Image: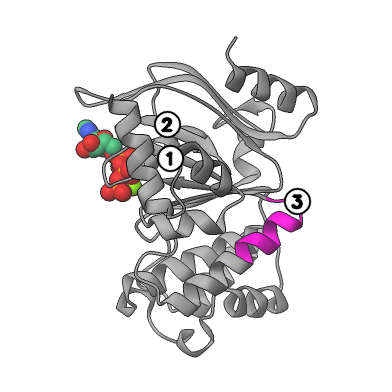
Amino acid sequence: MDALRIAHYIQRMLNIVAIEAEDLIVVRGDKLVIPGLTTAIPTGSVTGLLGPSGCGKTTLIRAIVGIQIIKSGRVTVLGSPAGTVTTRRKVGYVTQSSSVYPDLTVNQNLQYFAALAGQDAAAITEAIANVGMKADTRSLTGNLSGGQRTRVSLAASLLADPDVYLLDEPTVGLDPMLRRDLWKLFAGLAADGKTLLVSSHVMDEAGRCDRVLLMRGGKLVADATPDGLRSQSGEDDLERAFLVLAEREVA
Ligand SMILES: Nc1ncnc2c1ncn2[C@@H]1O[C@H](COP(=O)(O)OP(=O)(O)OP(=O)(O)O)[C@@H](O)[C@H]1O
Ligand SMILES: [Mg+2]
């Protein structure tokens, strides 16, 4: 058993692991997208899933949601296999492309998702404020920009109040102030005991996470805190740290 597996075993024993993947192998089409991945994501934390386009971030998230056929391995969410009925109710998945109704206004979409979650109008107002959307709520969702639509999806997931948030590139196309506010929101949710896995291909977002999974070619090249990445690579800048660790993996 290597050091990483011993660390995961201890986390599991202490019941502080929310998401666990063990020897996960995923093939899509004729491509081996994830050739064997093991990780454990702690409860009550923000974990960044970072890596270049096509490295397998969405595939890994889909495997955690339980909607991705896997070749072998094991994925567990809150102690149950990924995708079981009980697990799905506790997981909020914000997809990379918008998952709200384009032919409804923002308000109508959120009223619909609030009704599904048994939430009231005050919860809708709070969710809208949390994603910074106040002015646009009477617009047709299909007429919004990609970044605005993502925020509507994010507000819908907040209304469901899941224990685990799987957010696939939620900050793409957003201005720096809004990105900062959303990362604050994520930190606040984690402080309330929620577990967040947030994907991004922007390395400067790694610094805002409690832990970072650096992915390349379907493999994890690092699984550490931002400071851990810095010390493992000897680089202060996280983008350079990624390059050093990725090149080391290739070597
Ligand atoms: N349905 C599919 N059939 C075959 N290959 C696929 C399929 N979907 C994705 N892939 C391949 O799997 C790999 C990983 O894709 P994935 O969408 O998980 O990457 P990603 O890291 O989320 O990328 P991005 O940052 O662009 O969203 C890519 O090489 C992609 O071409
Ligand atoms: Mg993706």
Q: Which span of residues is magenta-colored?
A: 185-194
- Residue at the spot of label 1: 214
Image quarter in which the N terminus is found? top right
The residue that mark 3 highlights is 193
Image spot of residue 43 (x, y percent): 70, 41
Give amino acid for label 2: Leu
The answer for how far apart the CA atoms under marks 3 and 1 are is 23 Å
Question: What secondary structure is marked by label 2?
Answer: strand
Q: Residue at x 40, y 66 (%)?
A: 101
Pointer 2 residue: 220
Q: Farthest residue to the bottom: give it.
A: 135
- Identify the element where label 1 is drawn: strand
Amino acid on which disc 1 is placed:
Leu
Q: Quadrant of ligand 1?
A: top left
Image quadrant in which you'd find residue 55:
top left
The residue positioned farthest toward the front in the image shown: 234
Task: Decide whether the magenta segment is chiefly helix, strand or loop.
Answer: helix
